[in-house]
Amino acid sequence: MDYLTLGSSDRDLLDRSKLRISGTVELLGSTTPFSRTEQHVTKVGVHAIDGPVRLTRVSTNTMYIGPGISIPGKVTLFAYRSLVVLPETFTIPGYPVHVAHLRSSMDWNERAVGMAYYDANNSSGVTVEGSLDSITISP
């Protein structure tokens, strides 16, 4: 995803969304490391409901890990006039795939200056001002 507007504004606030996943795959007696990004994801389908209160966008995708091994994913975006919520669901196939690191994030562009960032670790919010912020990253 690399485009997002909120409400009736035509201001695109999103630079891009990112996915980082790494781990190992055990095949034929050997362990092979893997590292994938959003560039390795194939979109299977997308469905959007755009209404007066919010936009709901559901996309299904597949990430190829190795020979015959893929990870299905489903991402549901809820975008309100002043709030973006992005819960994600990943089905990790288990053996022979071992996931060591998984990160999903969104990079806002300069048009997001003045917005506030909230999450479970930063409940009082952090104002976006276009420079590196100090936020609580661990629960």
Image (tube, rainbow, N blue to C red):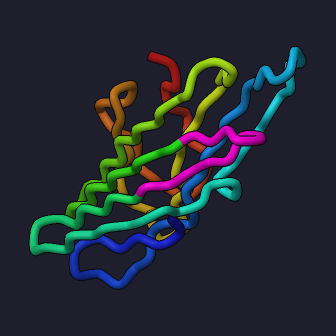
Residue 73 placement (x, y as % from top left): 47, 45
- Let me know if residue 23 is in the magenta part: no
Q: Nearer the viewer, residue 56 or 41?
A: 41
Q: Is residue 25 left or right of residue 31?
A: left
Q: Nearer the viewer, residue 40 or 79?
A: 40
Q: Residue furthest left?
A: 52
The span picked out in magenta is 60-71
Q: Is residue 17 left or right of residue 64?
A: left
| Residue lying at 52% horizontally and 26% vertically, measured from the top left | 137
Residue 85 lies, with reference to residue 95, above or below; the image says: below
Q: Is residue 17 left or right of residue 47?
A: right
Residue 71 placement (x, y as % from top left): 57, 40
Q: Is residue 58 left or right of residue 50?
A: right
The answer, for residue 90, to whether it is visible in the render is yes
| Residue lying at 47% horizontally and 73% vertically, measured from the top left | 3
| Residue lying at 60% horizontally and 51% vertically, measured from the top left | 18
Task: Identify the image quadrant of residue 101.
Answer: top right
The answer, for residue 100, to whether it is visible in the render is no
Residue 68 placement (x, y as % from top left): 70, 41
* Quadrant of the image containing the C terminus: top left
Q: Residue furthest bottom?
A: 10
- Let me know if residue 64 is in the magenta part: yes
Number of callouts in the render?
Answer: 0
| Residue lying at 58% horizontally and 21% vertically, measured from the top left | 94
Task: Identify the image quadrant of residue 23.
Answer: top right
Residue 106 placement (x, y as % from top left): 52, 52
Q: Nearer the viewer, residue 117 or 61?
A: 61
Task: Identify the image quadrant of residue 21.
Answer: top right
Majority secondary structure of the magenta segment?
strand
